[in-house]
Amino acid sequence: MQFRISHFAFAVLLAACTPATTRPPFSPVPEALHAVINAPPGVVTEAARAMLIADTVPVRFVSTLDAWLETREFAGTYKLRLWADPDAPGKARVTIEAVFRPAEDPSRTPRDLERAAPPGSRVSCAPSSSSAR
């Protein structure tokens, strides 16, 4: 018996399996902050967006579906990114990176030029040694 599938059904099947995501193709910097939060990933992402906007940090992109957020550059060349992944039921494993770009180089991608924000800087995710007392 020969099985035939219509073009429409094939297109629907293919679209349902598309691994498209709005998340970037790179991982967070190793110095990024990691935490588990008692809320689903989409809720964490939306709450982060609201807090950043309330603090006048310009948000460039947010997706509650992909639980991903990125700010525009602020305070010079600083940028924040948030990834929220499912952890236990109702919880999210959140990664927040604070990066800056110390130089411009058109021959390299912007991500290649980004460095983790130094501890204690205005946008660092880590406390400075003087404030950790």
Image (cartoon, rainbow, N blue to C red):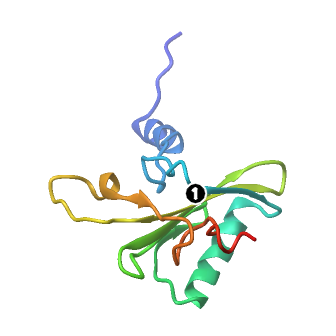
Residue at 55% across, 69% down: 124
Q: Is residue 21 above or below residue 49?
A: above
Q: Is residue 120 above or below residue 30?
A: below
Residue in the foreground of this view, choosing between 112 and 64: 112
To which residue does mark 1 refer? 66
User: Percent position (x, y) of residue 132?
Assistant: 71, 69
Q: Mark 1: which secondary structure?
A: loop
**Residue under the point 47% across and 29% down:** 5
Q: Amino acid at mark 1?
A: Asp
Q: Position of residue 125 (x, y in %)?
A: 60, 66
The quadrant where residue 43 appears: bottom right
Which residue occupies 64% across, 82% down? 51
As drawn, is 43 to the left or to the right of 4?
Answer: right
**Label 1 environment density (alpha carbons within 10 Å; few <14, some 14–19, many ≥20):** some
Q: How many marks?
A: 1
State which quarter of the image contains the C terminus: bottom right
Looking at this view, is 9 or 62 the one in front? 62
Residue 129 location (% of width, % of height) = 64, 67
